Image (cartoon, coloured by chain):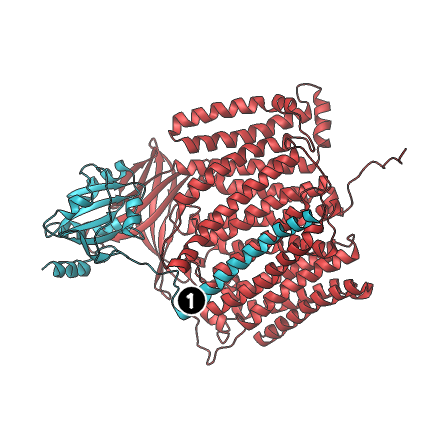
Chain colours: A red, B cyan
Amino acid sequence: MLSPEFGHFTLALACCLAGAQCLIPLMGAKLRNIRLMALASPLAWGQFIALATAFACLITAAVTDDFSVQNILQNSAIDKPLLYKITGVWGNHEGSILLWALILALFGTIISTFSQHLPTSLRSKVIAIMGGSATGFELFCLITSNPFVRSWPAPLDGQGMNPLLQDPGLAFHPPILYMGYVGFAVPFAFAVAALLEGRVDAAWGRWVRPWTVLAWALLTCGIALGSWWSYYVLGWGGYWFWDPVENASLLPWLTGTALLHSALVVEKREALKVWTILLAIGTFSLSLSGTFLVRSGILNSVHAFASDPTRGVFILLLLAVISGGALLLFAWRAPTLTQTGIFGFFSREGSIVLNNILLCTMAAVVLTGTLYPPFIQLLNGQTLSVGKPFFDSALIPIALLLFFVMAIGPVLAFKKGNFKQIWSTLRFPALGSILVTFAAFIYLRQILPALATGASLWIILSAIADYIKRLSLFKTTLINSFHRMTGLPRSFYATYIAHIGVAITVLGIVGMAASQQKIVEIPINTTIHLAGYDWTLTDIQDRQGPNFVATEATIQISKNGKPITWMFPARRYFERQKQVVTDVSIHTNLLSDLYVVLGDSKNSDKPQPLFVLRLHYNPLAPWIWIGGFIMAIGGFITLTDRRFRVGAPALRKKQLPKA
Amino acid sequence: MQEITRRRLLWTVPFAGAAIAGGGFLSMLTGLKKGNFDPHEIKTPILNRPIPDFTLPNQPPSTGFDQTMLKQQNQPILINFFASWCIPCLSEMGVLQQLSSHLKIWGIAYKDKSQNIEGFLQRNGNPYQHIGQDSEGNVGIEWGISGVPESFLIMPGGIIKWHYPKPLTATSTQYLLSLLS
């Protein structure tokens, strides 16, 4: 039943339903017709179910090795393990766009289920805009990237999948990353709906914030997974390469982080409204343009999807309609939105404004570095590349300033902060982090890593100091402190957990800067000394895998004569693709990674062959990703806050009647 | 009203910016289709032209060099960009050793630490007469390299005769030697 043709049909059906989901509620809102507006939710569900069926059809084709489907033929093969047959569905252009659309539809249904308390007009507009974006993507799928196209005559076996992608990490990285990208469609839809309604208030801020937090947390996880994947799969020993595609994911993350904070100001103080709307539009536009840059082939990147200018033109058109339309609406309606809340610079809002300025500056730097090469080539035909030196020198100073503000912000009160009070809370963390900066400078002999270490400590120590202060620990009885602890809102913990996550990631990055590595060319039974460890190559064996042959080295690691572990780096040769993939071996104790890559062998015909090994000692490396996941956990904790969970307004004292 | 107009103008800026970017992307895409825009293209703009200006500090165990020194040679010189962190450079070392008996080779240590280079040359032999240190990679940018190893053949007077952006092999050195004779 789940044939490719049925999939094609349900995809087209989903596209029609999405179009209806966009038009009917908008018309209903215009005519003030409750019945038409009420159709938004069933249409969103219908679109999701149709699209899920289409997706199931594609997975069925992949699992049953239906090589008459061109997409399966080009990306799969009989001997590919089952897990990768399933995950391979979104490992290529057509399938990944279908997944994009599916996630977009899923978010549409989640909104329609969890937003019953929203005013009907706003709710139907939000769902309609989600439907509009989905229509665009489903049309894109149908017109230029149809995954269900048949190929005739069908061959007996497929062409196989890029061996680099045959990894468990790839099973989770794209879906979670896409959920993050697509998640920002919700704040975008809220922003456009608010512009259409012509009204932004505290309630709007409260509705839009959990969606922003959800998208942000998922994007954080997605980026962390991607970075981890490149660390252990590519075998270059790095975790971030300033590749255009990585930058494309970093851009919405930076502006999304800004949005997350500015929406808080809208919610609490009804200020920064216009700016927050612009950020919501900008963040989703950056998510979309990330997809555009990757799929159109105008950037030189390691993430090579089969790029095609025709597809590029279509996505550009889609971008013009979605982002261009929203920005035009913004230019027209935003001036009429009025600001109500006022605040001093030295306040929580002031620190968030500074946070927004810094994060958006960082985003501008990344955007410039990413788009400079293609634009310069367009303008004067010069080829050049912008890499790590530019990004490091431009971003690190801004980031350091951001870390400095990050620790003070949560301690500050809304409206107007009290300098004396801040100083009494933060003087010990300040002293501690200055001392740590000096110690780090003496140890590392480099100014920037030392400052970054100090900044991380500053964030962590300030959080602890503020916590102690809020609990009145040591100043009152332990029982009292415990009561205060249970009384603290979840958002308090969420903020600090996310901020500490940032500090941990920064420490990991600093640690990686102090990594040691060695490239050696040795025969069997040779010992190498690196970073206090003895690395002995004891054996080299060939092993048969499901669709590859592996040459596997055995390396014994010992310290001071005591054996610690065995490591098995390998090189996998995939016969079908005639491609060699290195299988990195990593041993971690959470404080440092030992990382071994097996290179080519030399003089293999001679009695004593030589093997190339690349050995790395990466201190604090795992913290880079652990920090990312801690940030995301902070985000998820916010979502469990009562107000978000039940969608009830904040409990407030009854307003006193005017005297 | 004045206020509203000014804000209106201000809030049109994001749209204008996006429109300009969109126009740029569109012309890139049409360029891609016509074939006059290729982001993967690697150009070596200085082939058959004089070498760029540069000065390289000493990299032990040898001494550095600059463009005047290179121009004053009365025989062809092979300039080889390399690094200790690059596995293809390691595999290229044997070929360079053999080649060094036919041709003078000057090395440029690209984006590497001095002590790492010294260790690398101690382990694998030193085919270079002079070695300059390009720790920041700026000279590499001047020469237009896209990675390591890359080799350039410089004729007397400082003209770049040949460029090979890959590890040298037996075949490529044969071609190189045929250029000399």
Image height of B163 relative to B138, above or below = below
Question: Which of the two residues, A283 or B47, is positioned nearer the viewer here?
Answer: B47
* Residue drawn at 63 percent across, 62 percent down: A133
What amino acid is labelled 1 in the image? Leu
Mark 1 highlights which residue? B32
Question: Which of the two residues, A440 or A25, is positioned nearer the viewer here?
Answer: A25
- The quarter in which the N terminus of chain A is drawn is bottom right
Q: Is residue A324 left or right of residue A572?
A: right
Q: Position of residue A369 (x, y in %)?
A: 44, 49
Label 1 neighbour load within 10 Å: few <14, some 14-19, many 20+: some
State which quadrant residue B48 falls in. bottom left
Q: Chain of mark 1?
A: B
Q: Position of residue A209 (x, y in %)?
A: 68, 46
Q: Position of residue A212 (x, y in %)?
A: 64, 48
Question: Which of the two residues, A35 or A383, is positioned nearer the viewer here?
Answer: A383
* Residue drawn at 66 percent across, 28 percent down: A417
Q: Position of residue A601 (x, y in %)?
A: 26, 52
Image height of B33 relative to A546, above or below = below
User: Residue A630: in sight, yes or no?
Assistant: no
Q: Is residue A547 left or right of residue B102?
A: right
